[in-house]
Amino acid sequence: MMKQRGFTLIELIVVIVIIVVLAGLFLERVPFYQAQAEKAAMQQVEGALQSALVLRYGALMTRGAANEKELSILVTDNPITWLQKMPPNYKGEYYDPSPRSVAPGNWMFDLKSREMIYVVDHADYFKAGKDGQPWIRFHVHVDYEKMLGRPEAGKELVSTLFEPTEPYHWIE
């Protein structure tokens, strides 16, 4: 009786088919995971800008300058200037930009609308807003309420938020 050495051709083909199927499944999911990484990176900058807004407002409060005039400057200011270090994918200020003004995966500031814009790179996994463009627009929202029990005192600040201009949705 002879001992068999090595693989038969059929065994080799079966192994190759299994590897090809697994590679195909993996490669099919790579763009999805790239989109998820992009989403996380974008939300990291969004969170940094929200934190910078809170710090900026706190600085105004400690100087006693948290009045409507100073807060209106926060609403129209370019939020990137609040950060100690600019993100590497911030490409500058543009007047009434289009999504093609900067490469996908980058931030810009719209001088006309006074909004921060993130242009989505993996648009296949992103549902565009009302304008149908592959971007997310953010603005500073300042919310006031009348002071309880003291209507003559005017309004008081309730919240300062760096938020999307309209809801956006990443496809999961």
Image (spheres, rainbow, N blue to C red):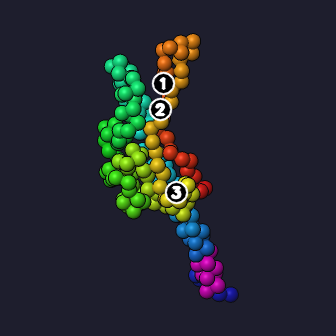
**Spatial CA span between label 2 and label 3:** 24 Å
Question: Where on the picture, by quarter, is residue 140?
Answer: top left
Residue at (36% x, 28% y) in the render? 70
**To which residue does mark 3 refer?**
131
Q: Are circles 3 and 1 on residues that touch, CB within 8 Å? A: no
For label 1, the SS is: strand
Q: Mark 1 or mark 3, which is nearer the start of the sequence?
A: 3
Q: Position of residue 143 (x, y in %)?
A: 50, 30
Mark sitting on residue 157: 1
Question: In the image, is residue 38 part of the stretch drawn in magenta?
Answer: no
Q: Position of residue 3 (x, y in %)?
A: 63, 84
Task: Residue at the far front: name it.
Answer: 152
Q: Residues within 10 Å of mark 1 (few under 14, many from 20)?
A: some
Residue at (32% x, 50% y) in the render? 93
Residue at (39% x, 32% y) in the render? 72
Q: In this rendering, is residue 41 above or below 122?
A: above
Q: Is residue 18 left or right of residue 100?
A: right
Question: In the image, is residue 14 part of the stretch drawn in magenta?
Answer: yes
First to last magenta residue range: 9-18
For label 2, the SS is: strand
**To which residue does mark 2 refer?**
142
Q: Is residue 35 left or right of residue 65?
A: right
